[in-house]
Image (cartoon, rainbow, N blue to C red):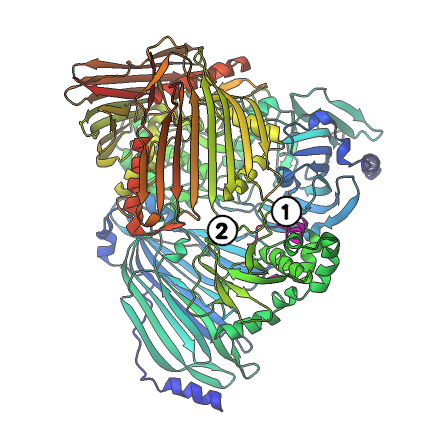
Amino acid sequence: MIRTGVFALLITVLTVNVKAQQGYDASLIPKDLLPYASSVVRLQEVNMYVKDLNNSTYHIKQAITILNKNGDDMADIEIWHDKTNVIKYVKGTVYNSSGVLIKKFSESDFEDVNANDGFSLFNDLKVKHYQPSVTEYPYTVEYEYEEREKQSLDFPDWMPNPGTGTAVEKSTFTFSCKPDFNIRYKEINLPSAVSIATDKDGVKTYTWQVSNLKAVKDEPYSPNPEKILTQVKIAPVKFTYERLDGSFSDWNGLGKWIYDKLLINRQQLPAATVQHVKELTAGITDPKLKAKKIYEYMQGRTHYVSVQIGIGGLQPFLASDVDQLNYGDCKALVNYTRALLKAVDIDSWYCVVTGDHSRKTSMLTDFASLQGNHAILCIPFKNDTTWMDCTSQTIPFGYLGDFTDDRIALACTPQGGILLHTPKYTADGNLLEHTGNFILDDNGGLSGSMKSVFKGTEYNDMDDVIQESLKEQIKDMQRIYPINNMIVQKLAFTQDKSLHPTTTEDITLKAPEYASIANGKVHFLLNPINRMNRAPKLVMNRTTDLYINEGYTSEDEITYTIPAGYRQYSEPLTVSIKNAFGTFLATSTLQGNCLIYKRKLQVIDGTYPKESYQDFVDFYQAVVDADDYEMTLVKNN
Amino acid sequence: MKKTLLLFSILFFVTLFAQAQDFNYGTFTQEEINMKKYDKDTSAHAVVLLEHGRSQIQPIDDENIDLVYEYHVKIKIFDKGGYSQGNIEIPYYSEDGSTYEQVQDIKGITTYQDENGYIKTAELDPKKVYNQVDSKHWSRLKFAMPGIHDGCIIEYSYRLTSPWFEDFHSWEFQSDIPKVYSEYDVHIPAYWNYNISKIGALPLSKNVGVAESDCFEFHGAKSGCSHYTYGMKDIPAFVVEDDMTSPKNYVSAINFELSDYYSLTTSSNIKVAKNWKDVDYELKHAEYFGAQLRRTGLLKDKITPVIAGKTDDLEKAKSIYSYIQKSIKWNDVRGRGSVDGIRKAFNEHTGDVADINLALTTGLNAAGLNADAVLLSTRQNGLINRLYPIITGFDYVVCQLTISDKTYLLDATDPLMPFGMLPLRCINDQGRVMSLDKPSYWVDMSTPQRRNSTYHFNLTLHPDGKIKGTMTHYSIGYEAYLKRQEIKKFNSVDEYVEYMNSKSTKFRILKSSITGVDSLEQAVSETYEIEIKEFKNLDHDRLAFDPYIINRLVTNPYKLADRTYPVDIGMPSTIRYTLTMHLPDGYTIENAPKNTNLGLPLSGGSFITDYHQDDNGSGFTFAHVIQLNKSVYQPDEYPYLKEFYNQVILSEKDELIFKKK
């Protein structure tokens, strides 16, 4: 009976395919889909069928027309697979601009390699890939493949329009399952809601469909694409994953499953290590200081190496393995730190979060599913929750930085999952200060020293530089400070790793011929230190809101002792701008023979209406212009 | 008989005991443990204490003789900056899953001092060595050393066996960290002969060659070996500098090229590469090279319609060139020979460099023109050794066409490349012209191409403070090719103009006209009607104006105190700016820029500024030109180049002042 049901379903799908195959003529693409598109998805059909908890089928059929060379990458077919997701078949056809078949391809044309995720030493996920080569544009690649998945937890999201440069004529997503398999789903930016049908055998089919989606244009300072693009997420109620059963209907349930099935019993440490950390913390009574000691101990004896094998990259290595190997990925290091803290009776929580420097991405509070890409640790001290990223050997205890700050994470506790908001770094707290004292001599030479202070998310700006040799550090300084002919005479960094950490840089420098001398006048750039070189690019007909991820404050005060017998020839600099998203002040004042240059730029994070983007560009352009201000001095007669 | 004599003559060398010994695995001294930094380079995060390699040709079983390479290294890691030395990758050649090269006996051990000062060791678990498949042909074994701590010593070794004598392991003495001592130990049975060359400036501290008796036996055939030992001590880290061609040209290393061997299976002497005559013969008859160049029949069918009705040779050549450009898409693979043949490349519409350019050469010849293939080494691949033929040193092939007395170098891998121009990657030293009917010879790869860019501004200052007018930008020569690439990144010219407008916050583009995008041999000309909001109003007595409207240099691109390697900018270039400015009535110009004429020694380049005020004072013309006449500047020219740019920057600080009369 069940078998017939499946057949019926497949036959329906096939009939649709046959009908759709006509008309890959590129000239039939609606004209309004062409702007900003280098490829157009003509037809996409994604079908997920859950036969059993450990047996589902993923089938995709797609026809995509490549309009020019920039779209070639979209014809690169990549099929991810591993022991749990097995490719059943793949085949495809290439059509020319008028839709005439020019070539067929099959699985034997594909190359099978290990996935390269860019950060792992090893990842056991593999990818079969093939890109048909066609020299004349436009052309259309139609392909389909099917994978059998021995799990029912991690269903791929349906995102018909995956990124910039691709328009979509039509895309459908169907999810089918037997009557006893229940799902929850989340529709994001769907023009029309799901349609649900049940056949005579009780097989439920959910169908979503979109058509005529225009290509997304890349707009700077735009919000997370996941907030703008069409997307459907599916989560099971009951599932099997790598031979582990489970069920959840909310974050509490998912967190509980992660705790019970993936995290429990992985914290055993060798007795010697337990003994050692006990001795290490003996005499410390403040639990927070104790935790700090443990964290620093962990940092001192581990480093980050990512190896993704086994349960879908979800389960951490054993703490005892990390203890012996001295390395691990984020999950393994969080689990290890938890074990060390446990050894001195401090409870902590393993937390899953989406790490992203450029956009704050939270767990969807109203929809629990496998989300996130990173693990961090949280200690629920009374009224003082403390967070730790365990993958760095250098950051201070309690420091998250802009990779995981200010977003919702999932804490996996013995009592179940809890959604927690990570701490936010404020525009006032993200501080970069420069205080310099320079002498400008009458040959145009500049010499003096400067102190720079970095706080908040700016704290770790210099971490990579600090790691380097002095020789490389000096090259970096020449890149950071655009002072022509700069010779670094002294350079030192100090880091205060307290709960409100600070990095301080002290530099002594000289730069012969910094100023140019012509016709008895001395010309020099007033701001050689902290220059904004370019405003964000203009966007015509912007469609997305203005999104500023992190706010910051930058304050500079540079005092120049100007050569004797000279006075200001140019007008003093006075710029003052205030906007919803920021303020900018820049002034120069002459006091005796001291020319004092002050600059303060503050940008406030947040989401602003798209109409304010032009103001934002103008604001930065004003900063660029002010930073380009040339001071001219002239000799007193 | 003759061959046996040859072998004996080698054995007459005095047999010495070569003291090239691998160091003992797992040993360390207290001094090494206590080491806090490396005295000869205190900035090093890690230092190789000892490194030993051994290559030997030896039978591995009854049927096979393999090249066996053993590697063993001991590294001191001082701090976190050196931890990456503990992540190891061993690439090897494999095909469709069945291994061709084999990596065996991987061992690793880390020695460190624990928190209590006790010395501990951690051994590499063989189960934690991972095999990563990168492509059809290449895989890598990867592992992370366990037990990494500040101050630890890591040590690992492995053996790699390979069936290819041609690819005798070279040895790089220099790497990204310094080395105390590095040694390579090479055993070559008398049946094989290699050309051995050393590159890089650092001297060997040990260079010994001795004869070993009875070191090789295979099915009763016995021979002695030449045993070479190359050692180097106190090796500095290799630092990559900007504008540098392949580091391979400078890293101190020993390379081997098989010249001939006595085949024990066929009992014959096989010359691999002795002189160019042999190489010419071999390539001419190789399936991957000469055979493809003789496929004129295949090409004739394809090009006949392409050149139909054309009588001029150059016209024919250009149409064939453009036909190949459009017919086979480059798969980004470089190569000196066509692996699967040009027929397949035509069928699949894709191929590597050799497929494309051998097809081009064959096509030109099929049309009765005179074309030859030219082997070369790309910039990335390094300079070619010209002392004796090393075929494996080439990684690219282009085509040389001769029409009457004029020769053209052609590369059809990029549909945007104009006829007669080469991509930058090919412009490297010399190439070898391989003709089917003449002996091969060297040709200079430095073609006469240049990058030229010309900007014309014709602007008027309006009473409302705005500056309006036109900006015309001509991109000429190689610059036009680069410009086309930039424009083609957009789906249409309109989208490109939108991008130009969005990135230039200084001025607004009101109208545009772009020509020459699709005719590859022309200049690309972009004309923009622009508006600059220069001044809020003209209610000032003096207005400061920066005549360097775009691309003003603020800092010197050359910052080093001195330079070790040549600065290679690829090809000469000229950037020319001309600004014509009209002023409203009632303004004069104060502070006119002084004229400059700066030169680099030996006509290496020049910087010229030229200011002309209109006779009636209503405006001015200001031109400036930066010209670099060389492709390569030697280290001793570096200070001049640096000072040249310094003067450019100082000049560009000049401002003009418009003064109310």
Q: Quadrant of the C terminus of chain B?
A: top left
Disc 2 marks which residue? B425
Disc 1 secondary structure class: strand
- Chain for mark 1? A
Furthest residue toward left: A564
What's drawn in magenta, residue-wise?
A: B318-338
Q: Residues within 10 Å of mark 1 (few under 14, many from 20)?
A: some
Q: Is residue B231 above or below residue B515?
A: below
User: Label 2 sits on what residue type?
Assistant: Arg
**Quarter of the view holding residue B399:** bottom right
- Closer mark to the observer between disc 1 and disc 2: 2
Disc 1 marks which residue? A129
Q: Is residue B377 above or below residue B638?
A: below
Q: Is residue A455 above or below residue B79?
A: above
Disc 2 secondary structure class: helix
Residue pictured at 25% horizontal, 50% vertical: B41
Residue A464 appears in the rendering: yes
Q: Across the whole image, how many numbered discs are drawn on residues?
A: 2
Residue A163 appears in the rendering: no
Furthest residue toward front: B615
Residue pictured at 55% horizontal, 24% vertical: A219
Q: Is residue A283 magenta?
A: no
Residue B42, image x, y percentages: 24, 48
Question: Residue B256: which numbered mark, if any?
Answer: none
The foreground one among A263 and B281 is B281
**Quarter of the view holding residue A566:** top left
User: Label 1 sits on what residue type?
Assistant: His
